[in-house]
Amino acid sequence: MTKNLQPKNLRKTDSAVGREIFRELTNEFVLREFAPATVLINQRFEVLYGMGPLAKYLEVPTRELTGNISVVARPELREKLLAACSQSIRENGLVSDSCARVNRDGMLVHCTLTVRPVTAPPEAKGLMLVTFADQTVGQSPQLETTVDGIGGVKEERQTPTEDIISMNEELETLRGRSRAILASLSAHIAVVDRDGVIVAVNPAWKRFADQNFGTEEQCGVGSNYLDVCVNASDNHGSGGDATQVVTKLRQLLAGTIDEFTMEYPCHSVTEKRWFIMHATPLDYEQRGAVISHINITERKQAEIALQESEQRLRAILDTASDSIVTIDHQGKIECVNHATELMFGYDKEEIIGQNVAVLMPQAHREKHDDHIRHYLDTGVAKVVNSFREVVAFRKDGSTIPIEIALSEVDGLNLFTGILRDITEKKRLEERILQTATDEQQRIGQELHDGTQQELTGLSLFLGTVLSILDNASQHNSGERVTWRLTDDDFSMLQQTISKLTDRLKETIQHVRELSHGIMPVQIDNEGLRSALADLAATNDSQKHFSCRFISSGDITISSNTIANQLYRIAQEALSNALRHANADHVLISLKGENNTIVLEISDNGVGIDSSISDRLGTASAGFGLRIMSYRANSIGGVFHIERNGDRGTMVRCAVPVQGYQNDDT
C-alpha cells in the first residue's frame, strides 16, 4: 500500500519546513506500512493506544480501540498474552514468546508477541508496549528498527502521551481507591470472567485461602472457579452445594439469571463454619461475575441454638397433659400443643390462624373477645390472670367442661391459655354429691326406721310408768302427802324403768353412731388421733382380722376439713383392704413432721397393680381410689398408692398444715 508523498503547495514553503513535513509523512508511512501491530497498555491491561495491523491479532472493534487487552485479544492468543504481561510486570523487564499462534483464515500462523515496560519519560512508568509479528524469514532486523522508530515517534508525539499519562493517573487513583475498598471488606471476594477464570481477589480471599491450605493454583488469580467447585464436589463430598454453585454460576455468566445467593457449611477440622455466597453479574466489556463469601457462623450458631431451644420448648409443651394455646391480641391462635389436638379433635394446621372463639360455644364467643379488648384498653383483668370454669366446644360439636387460666406474655401482645379438661373432676364431684345425698337418705332412713321407732318405744314405756303412777293412792299425814303403790305396781314400775333405761342407752348409742358417720372427728388436740384409734379398735374386734393404730410427733390440726378428709381416706383404705385385698392385718399410722401430717394405711393383702398410681386420674383406677385422691387434693395433700413389698398395699397421704387456708373459721 503506497501513498503519494508530494504535498500540495510544497514549492511555496520554506525548504526547512518542507523537510519537516517530509519527515512526518515518511514516519507515518513507515509506521503504517512496516511497523508491527503494537498496543500501549497499563498494568490493568487497559489499551491506551494502538497502531499497525492489529486486526491480525486482535478483535478490533469498529469504534476506537479501547478496553482490556484480554477482552479484545484473539482467543488462541489470550492465555499467552496475559501470561507474558503478568511476567513483565513481575520482572519489570522484556518478555517475548515466540511460540504463540493465531488462527487466520482457518490456519494457525506462528507469531511472536513481545511485552516491554516503558521506562521513559518517568511519567510513563507502569505502561507497556505489546507487539505482535508473524514469524517470517528476514523480519527480525526490520522489527528491531521499527520498534526503535516507534520510540522516536512516541517522543515526537509528547502531547498525546501526556494526555494518556494524565488519564492513567486518574485511572490509577480510581484503581487504588477500589483496591482499598476491597481490602477493607471482611467478605471473601473474587472476580471471574465469562469462563469462570478468577481475574482478581481481595486480601480477605487470600487470607482465607492461606489459613485453609489453599494454593494460588487452586483458588488464586488465573485458576478457574468452576473447576474448583467441580473438584470440591468430586473430592470432598460437598456434592450438593458445589454442584448447585456450578449450575447457578454458569447460568449467571450466560445471562439467564440476574444473581443468586445460597448458604452452605464449610467446616474445618477444628470448628464448624457456615458461609453465605452471593454472586452478581459484572458487565464490563464482557460478561463476568463478582462472587462474595461472608462468614455467618455466629448468626448460624444463634439460629441453631434458637431452633434447639424452640424444639426443647415444643417437646415440653407437647408432653404437657393440659392444652396450651397461644393467641395474639386479636384472639387469633398462633400455636397449640399436642394435648390441644387430642382435647378438641383438631389437627394443628386446621386450628392455627383461627380465632380462639372456635373452641367456645356460640354464647361465649363474643364475650371472650370483649374481655380481651377490655383488658388491652384498660389493663383491668376480667378473664386474664384468673382461673374460671367454662364449657369448651370440640370439632365434632360436643362440649366439655374445662378450667382455663389465661395470662399475658410481657411485651408481645400475646396471651397464653392453659386449658384443663375437668370432665373427670366434674364426674367425681357428681359422685361425691350423690354419695352425700345417698348418705343423707340413709341417715334419714335410719332416723325414721330406727331412732324414731326406738323413741316411740320409749314413749310407750313412759306411758306405762304414768299409768302405774296413776294407780298410786294418796295419804295425808299432816302437811306431808305420800303416794302408795301396791307391791305389784311397784314391781312393774321398777321393771318398766329398767327397760326404759336400757332402751335409752341403746338409743343414745344409735344416735352416737349416726352422728359419728356424719361428723366422725371432733376437733380438739386429740380429735383425729382418737377417731383413728376408735376406727382401728372397732375393726380389730372382727374374727380372723387385726387392725392396729400407731402415732408419733405433733399431730395438732386446727382444721376440721383436714381432719375429716384424712379420716375418710383411712376409712376408705381400710374398707378396700377388708373387701378387696383379702388382708388379715392392717396398720394405720399417723405422724407429724416438719409441719406435715402423714397418714399411712398398709395391709398384707394381695397387693395392688403397680401401674395404678399412674392411672389415678382415669376411670380405670376405680371410684374408691379416685375419691381418696380427690379428697387429698381438696386439702392440698399428696396422695400415693403402691405395692407394699412382695405383698400388700400401702396408701399414703401427706398434707402440709402450715399455711393451709382454713375455711372452717
Image (cartoon, rainbow, N blue to C red):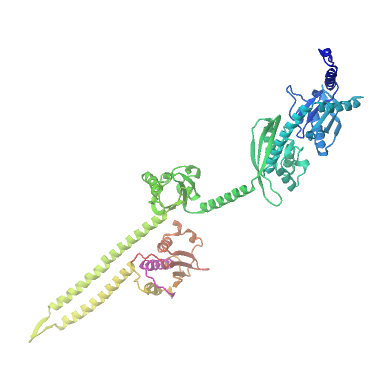
Taking the spot 18% from the left edge, 79% from the top edge, the residue there is 493
Any part of residue 544 in sight:
no
Left or right: where does residue 367 sit relative to residue 650? Answer: left
Tell me the quarter of the image containing the C terminus. Answer: bottom left
- Residue 10 is situated, as x and y percent measured from the top left of the image, at 83, 14
* Residue 618 on the magenta span: no
- Residue 262 is situated, as x and y percent measured from the top left of the image, at 64, 40
Closest to the observer: 337 or 589?
A: 337
Q: Quadrant of residue 8?
A: top right
Q: Magenta segment, which residues?
A: 551-577
Any part of residue 198 in sight:
yes
View extreme (front): residue: 14
Chief SS of the magenta region: helix
Closest to the observer: 476 or 654?
A: 654
Tell me the quarter of the image containing the N terminus. Answer: top right
Taking the spot 64% from the left edge, 32% from the top edge, the residue there is 258
View extreme (bottom): residue: 478
* Residue 559 on the magenta span: yes
View extreme (right): residue: 138
- Residue 601 is situated, as x and y percent measured from the top left of the image, at 45, 69
Closest to the observer: 163 or 555?
A: 163
Give above or below for 250 relative to 544. above
